[in-house]
Amino acid sequence: MIEAQGLVKKFRDKTRGEVRAVDGVSFRCRPGEIFGLLGANGAGKTTTLRILATILTPSAGTAIVAGYDVTRQSQKVRSSVGFLSTATALYGRLSAREMVEYFGRLHGLDETLLRQRIDAIFARLEMNDFRNRRCDALSTGMKQKVSIARTLVHDPSVMIFDEPTVGLDVMAARTIIEFIRECRDRGKTVIFSTHVMSEVEKLCDHIGIIHDGRLLAEGTLANLRQRFSKQDLEDIFVEVVEQ
Amino acid sequence: MSLRNIGIVYRKELIDSLRDQRTLISMIAVPLLLVPLLTIGLLVVMVRQVGEASEEVPKVMILGGEDSPNVLAELENPKGLFGVKV
């Protein structure tokens, strides 16, 4: 479960002065559900997700992730969260197996459990052909799979995806989309940010439209269609943003 | 950060560095070649300079000295110093 309550994140900018990247964002995302944060570039999606993943501390407000407070119990939040973005940021000279082992050990898994998890994840993601190949020699799709395996190794109950398909080809993007669905089907709490309307329509159970740091509309796709009397999500998005 | 995590990160960094050819070259190959070369080179230059210095006859200016004939004789010894009378 993710519960964000009045999240605010202020930055100081030399030219613009105080910038409120996130301005009072509140929402709730339940287990077995995909919550889609839909917004243009610079809307505050990544900042919100980074607060939830404890990478940033909120200037005000609070968020409870998997039952833990992001500011006071950040270590526990981190052990309950898997964070995946387009930037795989793998260590090029480590093999796929070593890479996942490294993160598993940092999450405190013992060697027996780690080996079992790696074998299961590598089999499920069909990674055994390249498990001992160095990451810098892998294709983009393979790197994405390593990144997914790293995200999954500690079996987090909450998954955070920050524009995970940006810049990926169709096949790599499909792998990610399937993986997100699988996470939901396994009862994980999934939050997903994107500016691609079709992905939101395909995946999300709940949608939040964010603009200038504020969550302007929230609901299921059916709710939003009914409220704005429009079928096309893009039209709904434009109307919400222009209001 | 716990000691265990420091060990995990250290091990990863070590593997990462040892697989980096540039790091290996700068850490092992360069010192292996450069250090002996520099040591031997410096030694050769030093020996050569000491040899040249020992063969050189220094020039000494003598002011007066009429009252010290023995010293003058010693200074005019061809194997010793070369005196210049003023």
Image (cartoon, rainbow, N blue to C red):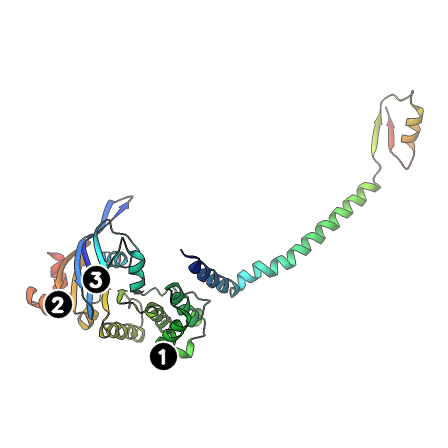
Let me know if marks 3 and 2 both belong to one chain: yes
The answer to whether mark 3 and mark 1 are in CB contact below 8 A is no
Q: Amino acid at mark 1?
A: Ala
In the foreground, B78 or A201: A201
Q: Work out how far the residue at label 3 is from the one at label 2, CA to CA, in angstroms.
A: 17 Å
The answer to whether mark 3 and mark 2 are in CB contact below 8 A is no
On the rendered image, what quadrant is the C terminus of chain A found in? bottom left
Q: Amino acid at mark 2?
A: Thr
Callout 1: SS:
helix
Q: Residue A86 at what x, y percent from top left? A: 32, 65
Please say whether residue A125 is visible from this viewpoint.
Answer: yes
Q: Is residue A1 left or right of residue B53?
A: left
Q: Which mark is residue A123?
A: 1
Q: Chain of mark 3?
A: A
Disc 3 target residue: A2
Q: Which mark is residue B73?
A: none
Disc 2 target residue: A220
In the foreground, A186 or A59: A186
Q: Is residue B70 left or right of residue A16?
A: right
Q: Residue A134 at what x, y percent from top left? A: 45, 71
Q: Answer few, some or many: residues within 10 Å of disc 2's Cα (few below 14, many 20 plus, some between 14 and 19).
A: some
Callout 2: SS:
loop
Which label sits in the foreground, 3 or 2? Answer: 3
Please say whether residue A43 is visible from this viewpoint.
Answer: no
Q: Answer few, some or many: residues within 10 Å of disc 3's Cα (few below 14, many 20 plus, some between 14 and 19).
A: many
Q: What residue appears at the point 74 percent right and 48 percent down from the top-left corner? A: B45
